[in-house]
Image (spheres, rainbow, N blue to C red):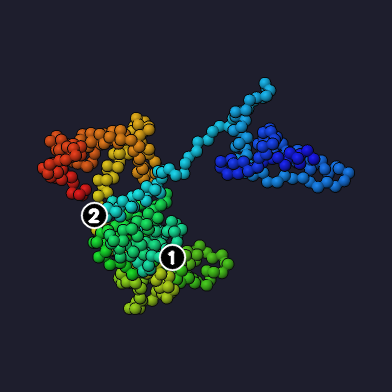
């Protein structure tokens, strides 16, 4: 069979360098053309379809594997690009070239920027850290917070990459309590891996690292509960809330038996029945309020009691206590966490310089659009979601110098909140010298210190 004979001379390609595995030097290049295999396959398919009409049974014929289809197609297209057309009407449109993006090149991403930030923070081990001014507000958004009981043990890299900080909050803080500068490499690996994500809140990561760096934080005793749910800062039980929890324990209104009969009572009699029911419900309201006030006098405690409450009330007291105790305990646990967070926030505020940094970052962000237009090849800006500051990479020094020049001019002209609005010209000149000259005198430094508000120090 002629087709079978042609198949013998078909060769196969393999590997990215299109190395020819089978080649017969005794034959012409035409019969060993890269595109010949497609023609043979097409003919065999039609032959197999027509074999059903043959008078005798024929075995379907198929070709051996022909190697990498992509590489064969690639070689065919390359050959067609440089082949001379045989007929005038023959035309060949070469495929468009696709730019190859090498995987060994560095690419700027949020995850990588987070890793760099963690490593620099731990290497420098600073006394001033840009953490957060509202730790309680961040914890409030977590439905459940892990307590300071267990030990942080995540041996698998996949567990650390997908770590939910909320559930491991307490164990991470305990780990940092026991760490110091000599454990820097262990901390680098851990927090770099945790922060290698697009959705990580770096305020939380910086705050947890602060527990390892700031010795004052290590002296704050931690609360002892294993988990905290529905945390809100300084939340305490209210009488209205306790009354809501008692709703299922209220005594049902029996009323006048006659009122339950399907009878047409006169309007006057019906009003009497309604008045009795309203009086019953009002008494229930008073009784539940009285019990709630009795319990609130025992706050704060892990579990309230009814010892000493002897008055008769229109509710099931035992059932009411069963409904109240779990929520009471949750609020008591959160109260301990709230006190702890308050002490932590006081220490963080002493070592916090984020207010000044945030102001400077906002100034930088306001100039990015113009810099991108003026220096398109010198600056790369990656926008971040949820209103976070963008990541900026300077590819050459001209864009960086232009940004510094603009910032100096903006600060010098008093267009920021870093200094008082009524600043004198002599002080403006001192500011310009301080931020633009490589070396300044001690008098200029002291003059600048006197201008900066104490809240930003």
- In the figure, residue 387 lies in which quadrant? top left
Name the residue carrying label 1. 278
Pick whichever, 318 or 234, lies toward us. 234
Question: Residue 313: horizontal and vertical position, in percent?
Answer: 39, 74
Name the residue at the left extreme: 443
Seen at 25% across and 34% down, the residue is: 405
Which residue has dot 2 on it?
A: 127
Q: Quadrant of residue 291?
A: bottom left
Q: Residue at x 57, y 67 (%)?
A: 263
Q: 212 left or right of 45? A: left
Q: CA distance from mark 2 to mark 1?
A: 65 Å
Instruction: Please state which of residues 267 and 3 is positioned toward the viewer in this rendering.
Output: 3
- Find numbered disc 2 in the image and state the secondary structure of the residue it sits on: loop
Q: Who is closer to the viewer here, 19 or 233?
A: 19
Q: Is residue 140 visible?
A: no
In the image, farthest residue toward the right: 55
| x then y, percent, for residue 365 | 32, 39
Query: What x and y, as percent, mark residue 58?
Result: 83, 46
Please state, as top left, top right, bottom left or bottom right, where the N terminus lies in the image: top right
- Disc number lying in front (2 or 1): 2
Determine crowd level at label 2: few under 14, some 14-19, many 20+ residues with C-alpha closer than 10 A: few
Badge 2 vs badge 1, beta-carbon distance below 8 Å: no
Q: Residue at x 32, y 68 (%)?
A: 223
Which one is in front, 370 or 322? 370
How would you rate the neighbour count of disc 1 (Cα within 10 Å): few for under 14, some for 14-19, many for 20 or more?
few
Q: Position of residue 212 (x, y in %)?
A: 29, 60
Work out whether 379 lies above or below 323: above
Residue 59 appears left or right of 141: right
């Amino acid at each position: 069979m002629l087709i079978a004979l042609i198949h013998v001379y078909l060769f196969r390609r393999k590997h990215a360098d299109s190395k020819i595995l089978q080649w017969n030097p005794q034959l012409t290049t035409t019969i060993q053309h890269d595109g010949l295999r497609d023609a043979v396959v097409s003919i065999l398919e039609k032959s197999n379809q027509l074999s059903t009409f043959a008078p005798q049974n024929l075995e379907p014929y198929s070709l051996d594997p022909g190697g990498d289809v992509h590489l064969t197609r690639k070689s065919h297209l390359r050959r067609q690009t440089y082949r001379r057309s045989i007929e005038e009407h023959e035309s060949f449109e070469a495929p468009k070239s696709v730019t190859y993006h090498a995987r060994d090149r560095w690419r700027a991403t949020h995850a990588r920027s987070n890793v760099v930030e963690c490593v620099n923070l731990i290497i420098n081990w600073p006394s001033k850290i840009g953490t957060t001014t509202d730790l309680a507000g961040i914890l409030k958004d977590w439905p459940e917070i892990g307590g300071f009981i267990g030990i942080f043990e995540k041996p698998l890299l996949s567990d650390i990459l997908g770590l939910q900080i909320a559930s491991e909050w307490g164990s991470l803080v305990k780990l940092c309590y026991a760490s110091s500068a000599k454990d820097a490499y262990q901390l680098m690996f851990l927090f770099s891996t945790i922060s290698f994500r697009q959705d990580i809140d770096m305020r939380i990561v910086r705050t947890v690292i602060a527990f390892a760096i700031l010795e004052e934080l290590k002296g704050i005793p931690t609360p002892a509960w294993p988990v905290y749910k529905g945390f809100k800062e300084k939340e305490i039980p209210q009488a209205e809330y306790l009354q809501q929890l008692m709703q299922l324990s209220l005594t049902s209104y029996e009323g006048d038996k006659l009122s339950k009969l399907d009878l047409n009572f006169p309007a006057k009699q019906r009003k009497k029945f309604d008045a009795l029911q309203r009086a019953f419900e009002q008494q229930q309201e008073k009784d539940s309020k009285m019990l709630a006030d009795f319990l609130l006098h025992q706050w704060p405690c892990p579990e309230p009691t009814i010892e000493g409450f002897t008055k008769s009330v229109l509710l099931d007291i035992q059932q009411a206590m069963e409904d109240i105790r779990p929520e009471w305990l949750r609020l008591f646990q959160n109260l301990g966490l709230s006190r702890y967070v308050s002490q932590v926030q006081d220490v963080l505020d002493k070592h916090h310089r984020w207010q000044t940094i945030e102001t400077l970052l906002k100034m930088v962000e306001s100039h990015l659009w113009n810099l991108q237009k003026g220096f398109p090849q010198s600056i790369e800006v990656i926008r971040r979601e949820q209103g976070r500051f963008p990541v900026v990479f300077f590819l050459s020094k001209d864009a960086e110098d232009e940004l510094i020049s603009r910032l100096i001019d903006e600060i010098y002209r008093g267009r920021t909140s870093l200094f008082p609005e009524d600043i004198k010209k002599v002080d403006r000149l001192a500011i310009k010298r301080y931020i633009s000259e490589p070396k300044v005198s001690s008098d200029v430094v002291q003059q600048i210190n006197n201008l900066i508000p104490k809240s930003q120090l």
